[in-house]
Amino acid sequence: MDSWPAIDDMAAGVQKAELRAVDLVKRSLEKIDKSKEYDALISINKEGALERAEAIDKRVAKGEKIGKLAGVPFIAKDNFLTLSGKTTAASNMLKPFEAPYQATAINKLEAEGAICVAKANLDAFAHGSSTENSDFFVTKNPHDKTRVPGGSSGGSAAAVALSMVPFALGTDTGGSIRLPAAFSGVVGYKPTYGLVSRSGVVAMASSTDVIGPLSRTVDDAALILEVMSGPDELDSTTISRDKKPYNDLLPQIRGQKVGIIKEYFDEGLEPGVRQVVDDAIKKLKSAGADVSEVSLPSLPLALAVYYIICPAEVSSNLARYDGQRYGHFAKEARTLQDSYKLAREQGFGLEAKRRIMIGAHVLSSGYYDAYYKKAQTVRTKIIKEFEAAFLKYDFLVGPTSPTTAFKIGEKTSDPLKMYLVDIMTVAANISGVPAISIPAGMSDNLPVGFQIIGPQNSDRKLLAMAKAFEGLK
Amino acid sequence: MSSKYLPTIGIETHVQLNTKTKLFAAVGNDAREVAPNTLISHICVGMPGALPVLNEGAIKLSAAAALALGTAPQKLSHFERKHYFYPDLPKGYQITQYQAPIIVGGHLHIDNNGQKKCIRIERANLEEDAGKNTHPAGADYSLVDLNRAGTPLLEIVSRPDLNSPAEAKAYARELWLLMKYAGVTDGDLYHGHVRFDVNISLSKDPDKLGTRSEIKNLNSFRSVEGAVTYEIERQTELLEKGQPVVQETRGWDEVQQKSVSQRSKEEAEDYRYMPEPDVPPVELDDKYIEDIEKQMPELPPKIRQELAKIKFDSKVIEDILDRPEAVALILKVLDTADSEATRRTAFWVLQSAGNPANLKADKVVELSKMVDDGKLSSTAGKTIFEEMIKSPETPDKIAKRLKLVQVSDESEIEKIVAEVITQNPKAAEDVKAGQAKAIGFLVGQVMAKSKGQANPEVAQKLIKKQLGG
């Protein structure tokens, strides 16, 4: 069996003792072992995962109820703090870091019986779109080893595409779940901002950071959201969740008003990607959706806004990594100033340093109004344009990325080119709305992602629509 | 002090809020005499992924502070991050308020030896305290204690409305009183619960301000006064010599009573303020503010009025206000009994070093009545008051236990008087001859024979009666 059963079936099987959690974990570990060449993972929690699986099987034997994810193995991006093993954020700064507490999202998954088998590679501190900014190694695209898997949740996307696990966790600050999902050919879901607690996840840009699943199907993604979502007293930006279960979905396309985002179809769009996306839109139409084109004129500014606000928050969030209390520290430093300078010089990679410098600059007195404040003004404008569009449309659609997965090394010398990769994903982050990338077809043997965006807190509806679209193939 | 220059003084006061837990973490807030780094959590240490969660108690106390300062809290306020690197600042930024603080405006009244003045408040922002660095002598390392990191502070900034050391001291004390009585802070000055930063400049032209210096971290009213006095002298001397005053931060040497330069403003850092994305803005509605208003305790201005009604002089009133733990008792007595009982209670409180916070007003009134009725001497009353602080017994029982009940029954004392006169014929003769001193001697003998329990006034009256003096 190369592929995994649906997650709810698997959990039900474990609960009924038809499947053993230990076998599921072993199968995952075998798959991981066979896929080493893709460099998707930073650490593997073999003993810990097997122990947990045995404990679950024993509890099942005693007749205990385990939970919605009984015995289901998963992989977490290595910026989720876990009590077993290290949490590195793929950075030299946190290379030795063992977390003293665990992310709320991990706690919630484990409480329902899920088992974390490994931690996945990412761009260090989630800064990037390809995993090439990992301080350790580059993850390879499961469809073409010479290409990137997308980023920053590239290890998580590759792990799901390679069937190491039925689902993986990612974080999406500017597209870091949806982009690698599109490049690697899996489902990548970014929930409404605040729906899943950020507590215990290494912060990148606090006002846009969102936690979500990468999975093979929309149903699986919905089940994971169902388990992870809800207010958390450790994160005051969390919001109340839908009362109905998120995985109880009634797929419907007929009569849904769908807006095609005009700005995403300009000359930058690769013809092969355009072909797949046009086909997807045709399918929606013939299934009865009410489709028309919509323009959000400020959308082309979203990337510029993002690359001011994000580095500003990054420069602030990375200030705590000062080599004094945990993580990397500079043994050779003899003065306080040196210990700061050397620890940060040695612990941060190029991209982290670049973002710290940009961020410190846009926040410095004399530049704040011209950059940060102006970016916040435009951000508000984009939010308003989305709100206006959602008065007329149930969903907005377009490609997840203008291209398919690019070659390893192709964009590393030009940071601006790399930033442009996020051009179709950042808008959902700066406006906090939910968005999903679903595999829609192939272009030159590489996967193409179709993006559906919904209004704030429309997560159930959005997932239902995505499920319906998934069924059209 | 030269009278040519007008001093202009503004004071920034850090008031530590007496919340149970820290501003953004569910960890104990009282770091007094606690082992280093035991009041910390992943939030206080600035772990990766740790998020601040606002303590609602700090908002309540800030709202109470606003009301005590004659204004209402802002209905919308938010937090900012202030960035700098220092080992006592684990996140690399302090969460504070910059653009929209919780208090804007307000005022308080000072009374400087009878001269009343209104001092305006500019703003007050809610922020977290840093930890504490210590540098062991001779060691090549420093120690960091994060127990205090994250303790809520209200930084109250006055307008530059103060013009003399005495006014500065009066402001510091009045602000302390208001915050203490409003229940905002424990106000423990020794442990730095209230700290003052004083800004001073001199100018000949009352419409123009001179260059200011700032004396930081003063923790008593006296050091506020001392620092201002010293700065005025220092700056006057500079100006007289035609030398410029440097805009700088200075520390206060309590022992030598002088200020010392710490850093000049040219080296001032850019804090790169940024809205705090992890803490949603604070929104307060009318109902919230009204509820806090209803729960406000009585504040010094009102208490002064109450006590002035029974003709306490202002010095005594201020002495009473300096004993906040006893004020409730005094007011309760005033409420339920007469002014004589209140005076007596106040007198007992001011004479006592004990904490009478737990005393029941009705028992104290009972005690006062016993003195009124001649059952106790006033000295015995004071002794029993001290005893009541330590023991839950009624004053009556304590009086009996300590044998302090005064005998005023004339027939009983008459017997003793007769005995004393018989035993001291010489003194009796002297009294008859009109020597007042001899009466005192005989009264003393009566007191001794009654083991101190006879009412001396009654004894004197009876001696005179028997001897016809």
Image (cartoon, rainbow, N blue to C red):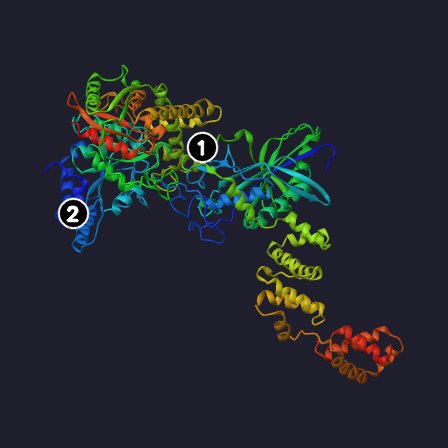
Looking at the rendered structure, whether the residues under marks 1 and 2 are on a common chain is answered as no
Q: Position of residue A186 (x, y in %)?
A: 20, 31
Would you say A13 lies left or right of B376 here?
left
The kind of residue on which mark 1 rests is Pro
Would you say A236 lies left or right of A273 here?
right
Pointers 1 and 2 in contact (CB under 8 A)?
no
Name of the residue lying farthest toward the front: A255
**Height in image: B60 above or below A129?**
below
Query: Which residue position holds label 1?
Result: B275
Q: Nearer the viewer, residue A175 or A281?
A: A281
Check disc 1 and report its element: helix, strand or loop.
strand
Q: Position of residue B117 (x, y in %)?
A: 69, 40
**Residue B135 tag number:** none
Chain hosting mark 2: A
Would you say A208 lies left or right of A179 here?
right
Query: Which residue position holds label 2?
Result: A14
Q: Nearer the viewer, residue B202 or B373?
A: B373
Residue beneath the point at 58% across and 42% down: B196
The kind of residue on which mark 2 rests is Val
Check disc 2 and report its element: helix, strand or loop.
helix
Judged by depth in the image, the label closer to the viewer, 1 or 2, is 2
Q: Quadrant of residue B166?
A: top right
Residue beneath the point at 70% across and 68% down: B371
- Residue A407 visible: no
**Height in image: B342 above or below B77?**
below
Q: Position of residue B390 (x, y in %)?
A: 58, 66
Name of the residue lying farthest toward the top: A267
User: Marks 1 and 2, Cα distance to the nearest angstrom?
Assistant: 47 Å
